[in-house]
């Protein structure tokens, strides 16, 4: 629950979740979520200094997060900040630097939810490199060794 809301209401318009929020949804500890991100089983995006898990990646693993329909169409920056777990300042900075493709000449600035979903997905990576570059190579090497061992085991049978 978030701010007294049920999970259904809290997840309704969320576009991305932080690692602790993802852990709470799954009923795991954050360490488990981090290990899934590092192993490449869970898609994650580094947006600024935050690690966010796109809603679509969570729904692939858990099914629909909410039975309520997600709002469609444009939203104000302040609404999207809540839905993405980003600060208003960071999101405005991304718009003004051109990192987030939005027409910023109109006031107030509205962003289409699908544009935001696509933008977060474009930053997502399942290799663990963007999330923890210091650990990514070791994880990739261990996964490669496990695959080779499993292939050798199957061929021996």
Image (cartoon, rainbow, N blue to C red):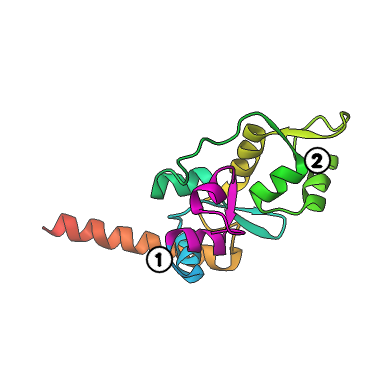
Disc 1 crowd, CA 10 A, few/some/many (<14, 14-19, 20+): few
User: At 60% across and 54% down in the image, what residue appears?
Assistant: 52
- Residue 144, placed above or below residue 103: below
- Residue 139, placed above or below residue 118: below
Per the rendered image, the range of residues in magenta is 1-26
The secondary structure type at the circle numbered 2 is helix
Q: x, y (%) of residue 143?
A: 39, 61
User: At 71% across and 53% down in the image, what residue appears?
Assistant: 86
Residue matched to label 1: 142
Of the pair 94 and 10, the residue shown nearer to us? 10
Q: CA distance from mark 2 to mark 1?
A: 39 Å
State left or right for residue 147 relative to residue 110.
left
Q: Sequence-wise, which precedes: disc 2 or disc 1?
A: 2
Q: Nearer the viewer, mark 2 or mark 1?
A: 2
Q: x, y (%) of residue 137?
A: 52, 63
Q: x, y (%) of residue 2?
A: 58, 58
Q: Quadrant of the C terminus?
A: bottom left
Residue matched to label 2: 95
Most extreme residue toward the left is 157
User: At 72% across and 55% down in the image, what residue appears?
Assistant: 48
State left or right for residue 51 relative to residue 143.
right
């Amino acid at each position: 629950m978030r701010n007294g809301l049920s999970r259904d209401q809290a997840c309704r318009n969320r576009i991305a979740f932080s690692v602790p929020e993802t852990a709470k949804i799954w009923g795991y500890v954050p360490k488990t979520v981090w290990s899934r991100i590092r192993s490449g089983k869970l898609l994650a995006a580094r947006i600024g200094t935050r690690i966010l898990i796109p809603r679509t990646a969570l729904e692939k693993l858990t099914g629909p997060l909410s039975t309520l329909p997600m709002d469609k169409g444009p939203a104000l920056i302040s609404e999207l900040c809540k839905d993405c777990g980003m600060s208003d300042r960071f999101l405005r900075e991304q718009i003004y630097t051109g990192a987030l493709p939005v027409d910023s000449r109109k006031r107030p600035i509205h962003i289409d939810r699908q544009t935001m979903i696509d933008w977060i997905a474009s930053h997502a990576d399942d290799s663990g490199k963007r999330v923890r570059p210091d650990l990514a190579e070791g994880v990739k090497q261990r996964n490669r060794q496990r695959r080779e061992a499993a292939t050798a085991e199957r061929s021996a049978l």
